[in-house]
Image (cartoon, coloured by chain):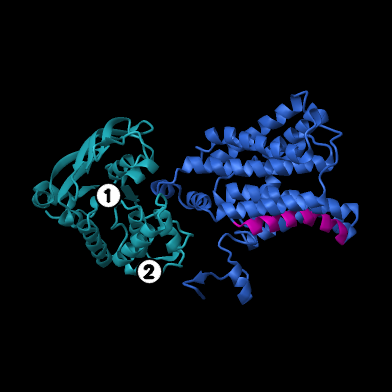
Amino acid sequence: MLVLENIVTHYGNIQALKGISLKINKGEIVTIIGANGAGKTTTLKTICSLVKPTSGKIFFEGNDITSKHTSDIVEAGIALVPEGRRVFPKMTVMENLSLGAYLNNDRNKIKNDLEKVFDLFPVLKNRLKQVSGTLSGGEQQMLAMGRALMARPKLLLLDEPSMGLAPKIVSNIFDIIQQINSEGTTILLVEQNAQMALSIANKGYVMETGRFILEDSANTLLNNEEVKKAYLGES
Amino acid sequence: MNAYYLQILTVIGINIILAASLNLISGYTGQLSLGHATFMGIGAYSATLISIHLGLPFIISLIIGGVVAAIFGFIIGVPTLRLKGDYLAIATLGFGEIMKNINLNLKITGGPMGLRGIPQATNIYIVIAAVVLTIFAINRIINSRVGKSFIAIREDELAAEAMGINTTHYKILSFVIGAFFAGIAGGLYAFFFRYIHPSNFGFMKSIEILCMVVLGGMGNTYGAVLGAIIITVLPEFLRTVSPVISQYRMVFYGLLLVIMMIVRPQGILSQDFDFTLFNHGLLGYKKKKGGQIQ
């Protein structure tokens, strides 16, 4: 479904991605784990064309999307839940959700999608008129995910959904990610919480300083000695 | 009504158009522009020159002035709107200086002599009509899909882009619309005072417009209206209070601005000000939460 071929991305003179290749099949949950500054967020931003790659190619459902504008990529069916949630703080929950459906003009579909989002995140339904900046961290994460789902993505990119959340809420969020996946949305999950990410993923990539150093099925990675040492906190 | 009050009313009207249009760019879209008076100047000069040299009727010249200002808004917007915050502010400032010097040196603009002998065509009714139309148009824009895109860009540009909003496109659009109304205001100004000079549309005027927007409340159209009224009336009002205050009126004017910003930095009517609160006798200090006043 999504293929990255030798992507190199620069920030000014600094090479953030040093030629990465990645493949996601339809229906999968794929995770990229790694430390701060490894290039995980840059990978997602490059896929969405928020940052332009210097070289390499990106294919989505067989089409080359490398040089396309972000709005075309969203329209093609890729939605991003950005790092740190980034809800529109002074807008209400409802306004945030309707902006998620920005490229959708069909009122009936929007209504339907809203119901689906409320099924996944019942807490949002009671907060529709609340200003988003006053939601708790977990609620904001749910809103950011709901907002992205309003774009009807085939592929959902999640950037550190566990960041700054209590363990209980993290496991709640991860349950919902699995549920979204089971309803047919392919997921690319970027996480520092390697344990959680690998436990729900089919496949994992381990990233270090702009490169994938390991790539395997999530189960194999969970039992890999190096990964255990470096990312799972076991010795 | 005597001529003095009529003139103040006219200036208030022109300033409301300027403040409301800058508010669209800076208050709603979040792009800090220090060159709004430049677009006013472009509108003033083009409307005047078109009217004098081509003999077109006033209203047509006025609209062409707005269109020319909008075209300049586009030309300036495309390269500069890729800059953010302070950098954009400095770039718009530089553009203002360029236009001022062009107007000071061209023959057709009268250079440092300014343009004189412009026919008197602006009257209070036309100004009121222009103000009403401007406020109506800007409110319609803000409540549309386009307006939501502007606000989303202000709130979080990256998130807006990730929603599929073409942020560059909408920032330029906001700039162009704002420039159009500033150009109209410039035309009204020229045909009211019958004399224009490059210094009428310089940096100080841009700052004055920005003061109106900030004082009234960024991101609230009625705030911009209120700010324009206060900033226009205040110096005139201080003139009448007492001889001492009259002499130092600009000092008091400055002092009042400082106090206002300390007491209410979000502006008199802040962007989340909700008019329904009038019904509860509150003045925007308390926010609606889940439909209940807290």
In what element is the residue under mark 1?
A: loop
Q: CA distance from mark 2 to mark 1?
A: 24 Å
Identify residue type, mark 1: Lys
Check if residue B233 falls in the magenta segment. Answer: yes
**Highlighted magenta segment, given as a residue range:** B220-241
Q: Which residue is mark 1?
A: A154
Number of other residues with Cα within 10 Å of mark 2, as a class: few under 14, some 14 to 19, many 20 or more: some
Image colour for chain B is blue
Check if residue B265 falls in the magenta segment. Answer: no
Q: Which residue corresponds to the image point at 57% horizontal and 59% vertical from the top-left?
A: B271
Q: Which residue is mark 2?
A: A125
Q: Please indicate, yes or no, whether residue A165 appears anywhere in the rendered image.
A: yes
- Asked whether disc 2 touches disc 1, contact meaning CB atoms under 8 Å apart, the reply is no
- To the question of a shared chain for discs 2 and 1, the answer is yes
Q: Judge left or right: residue B292 versus residue B243.
A: left
Q: Please state the horizontal and vertical placement of residue A169, each as a whole percent of the image.
A: 28, 65
Q: Please state the horizontal and vertical placement of residue B83, each as a whole percent of the image.
A: 51, 38
Q: Which residue corresponds to the image point at 35% horizontal and 33% vertical from the top-left?
A: A67
Q: Please state the horizontal and vertical placement of residue B53, each as a whole percent of the image.
A: 79, 28
Quadrant placement of the N terminus of chain A: top left
Number of other residues with Cα within 10 Å of mark 1, as a class: few under 14, some 14 to 19, many 20 or more: many
Where B54 falls versus B188 (above or below)?
A: above
- Colour-to-chain, cyan: A
In this rendered view, identify the residue nearer to me: B63 or A198: B63
In this rendered view, identify the residue nearer to me: B74 or B53: B53
Identify residue type, mark 2: Lys
Q: Which mark is residue A21?
A: none
Q: Judge left or right: residue A101 versus residue B64.
A: left
Magenta span: predominant SS is helix
Q: Which residue corresponds to the image point at 72% horizontal and 49% vertical from the top-left?
A: B130
Where A124 falls versus A7 (above or below)?
A: below
